[in-house]
Amino acid sequence: MDKRQAATAARKEQITRTAVTLLAERGYRATTFEAICTEAGLSSKRLITYHFSGKDELLAAVADQIVADSERYMLAALDGVTGARELLAAVIRANVRFIADHPQEVEALRQILLNGGLGDYEHHDVDSRHRLARLLEEGRRTGVFRPFDVRVMAAALRASIDGVAPLIAGGMDPGLCADELVEHFDRSTRADKAER
C-alpha cells in the first residue's frame, strides 16, 4: 500500500470510528456529517463526502467495520479450538465477550438497526447464521450433536447471543450470560441424552 492509499484508508477509518462514537454516545439523529467533522477535528464535510456519498453509505461502512472487528476477535478466540461441543461453547463465549468488550460498537450497530439500517447489516446476519449452521451440521455429521434443523438452531443461537447485549449493557455479568447460553445450547444440541 502506498502513502496515498494508506492516508485514504486512515481517513476513512477515522471517519467511521468517529461515527461509531457519536452513534453510541448521542444517537442516530445526532450523528451528522457536521458532528463528525467537529468530533474528528476535520476542517470540512468535503473530507467525509470524498469517501462517502451520504449518511447511508457511511453507516453501511460502519456496520462493515464493526463486523470486521468482530470477526477478527472471533478468529483469535477460536484459534486452536477443536471438537463440535468445544467449538460451539467457544463461539458463544467469544461472541458474548465481544459484546461486553465493545459496548460502543454494539450500541452503534443497534442505533443503525433501529433507524432503518437493516439493509446495511442483513447480509452480515445471514452470513453469521450460515457459519453457525455449518458448525452445527458438522457436529450432527460426526454424531456429537443430535438430529435437528440446523437453520432453526442457528437462528435461535444468533438471536440468543444478540439478546444478551441489553442485559450486559444493563450491568449483568457477561460471564454468567455466556455460562447460561453455553449450558442451554449444549443441552439443546448434544447427542448424549443420558447427560441432559
Image (cartoon, rainbow, N blue to C red):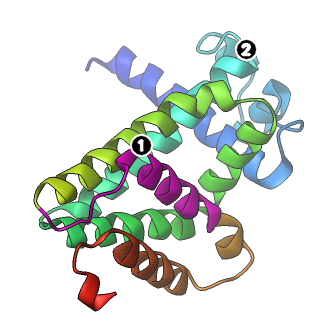
Which residue is identified by label 1? 128
Label 1 amino acid? Ser
Where is residue 9, by image quadrant?
A: top left
Where is residue 81, by image quadrant?
A: bottom left
Looking at the rendered structure, the secondary structure element under dot 2 is: loop
Q: Give the residue at x 32% y 44%.
A: 131
Q: Nearer the viewer, residue 106 or 187?
A: 187
Residue 93 percent across, percent down from the top left? 39, 72
Label 2 amino acid? Gly
Where is residue 191, by image quadrant?
A: bottom left
Image position of 5 (left or right of 190) = right
Which residue is identified by label 2? 54
Q: Residues within 10 Å of mark 1 (few under 14, many from 20)?
A: some
Q: Are marks 1 and 2 in contact (CB under 8 Å)?
A: no
Looking at the rendered structure, the secondary structure element under dot 1 is: helix
Residue 178 percent across, percent down from the top left? 47, 78
Is 151 included in the stretch rendered in magenta? yes
Q: Residue furthest bottom?
A: 195
